[in-house]
Amino acid sequence: MTRFARAGAYQKKQPHDATSWLEMRSAGAADSSSSSDGRRRDDHQQKGSRDRFHRKRGYDDSFYNSKQSDEWKRGNRSEFRRQKRMDKREAVKVCFNCRKEGHMVAECPDEKRRQGMGICFKCGSTEHGVSECRAKVKSDEYPYATCFICKETGHLSKQCPDNPRGLYPNGGCCKECGSVEHFRRDCPELQKQQGFIDVKASKISDLSSADAEPTEKTDFPPPKIRKKGPKIVKF
């Protein structure tokens, strides 16, 4: 047997008539107008309190306008100084090719004098530079280099005999040995004093291990080869 809890209250409920669309539309418009009026009233109150606070502090519209103009002027002055520094650096540049100011060798407009540029000074290849070259040439030799001073090939401008200043165009020399062909940090005498010695790494064969510790080679005397006597055959 099925029982219904509070069945009497359920039977007493009576449905109401449906609300018309006109009544619902008018009620929604009234709610939206009241909410917008409330928000407008709150914004006005906040603005009034903010204005009273600023008037108490002595701020007005001219203060904010002047502050914005100061920020704009400050940014404009900073940009002007940055552009001035860039122009100054560009003006100091001197092309080693044509000896004119305002550009570097890579940007030189004189195409005739740019022959020999953009190649490897050790092997003459156009696919790589000196730092990536694997040609068996001494470190201070550049067979394909063109000197900017005497226009001859075989050496750089710092090694040119017609260049008395070398790497120091404004004068000066190495503080250790007095040479103008290298800086003090690259001085061989200073490196010897600090204990730096040039060591050549030995080649690794297919049968040797890459994890093996390098051993110092000592000059041992060659082994004596015993001379073999006549061979005797017994029957």
Image (spheres, rainbow, N blue to C red):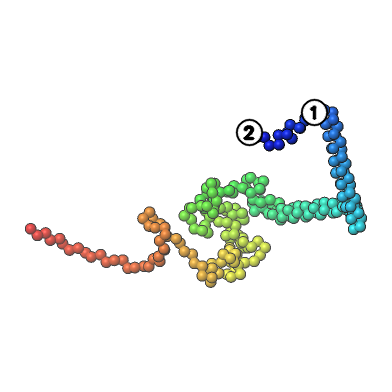
Q: Residues within 10 Å of mark 2 (few under 14, many from 20)?
A: few
Q: Is residue 30 above or below residue 166?
A: above
Residue at image mark 2 = 2
Rendered location of residue 22, percent (x, y):
84, 28
Rendered location of residue 13, percent (x, y):
76, 32
Rendered location of residue 59, percent (x, y):
90, 55
* Nearest to the observer: residue 45 or residue 157: 45
Q: Quadrant of the C terminus?
A: bottom left
Residue at the spot 61% in from the left edge and 69% down from the top edge: 175
Q: Is residue 74 left or right of residue 224?
A: right
Residue at image mark 1 = 18
Q: Indicate which disc residue 93 carries.
A: none
Point out the residue furthest to the left here. 235
Q: Is residue 195 left or right of residue 82?
A: left
Rendered location of residue 190, percent (x, y):
55, 69
Query: Picture quarter containing residue 15?
Result: top right
Q: Residues within 10 Å of mark 1 (few under 14, many from 20)?
A: few
Mark 2: amino acid: Thr
CA distance separating discs 2 and 1 = 34 Å
Mark 1: amino acid: Ala
Task: Residue 73: tell me if it is visible.
Answer: no
Query: Picture quarter containing residue 25?
Result: top right
Residue at the spot 89% in from the left edge and 55% down from the top edge: 53
* Nearest to the observer: residue 147 or residue 193: 193
Q: Earlier in the sequence, mark 2 or mark 1?
A: 2
Residue at the spot 53% in from the left edge and 46% down from the top edge: 127
Residue at the spot 17% in from the left edge and 63% down from the top edge: 229
Q: Quadrant of the N terminus?
A: top right
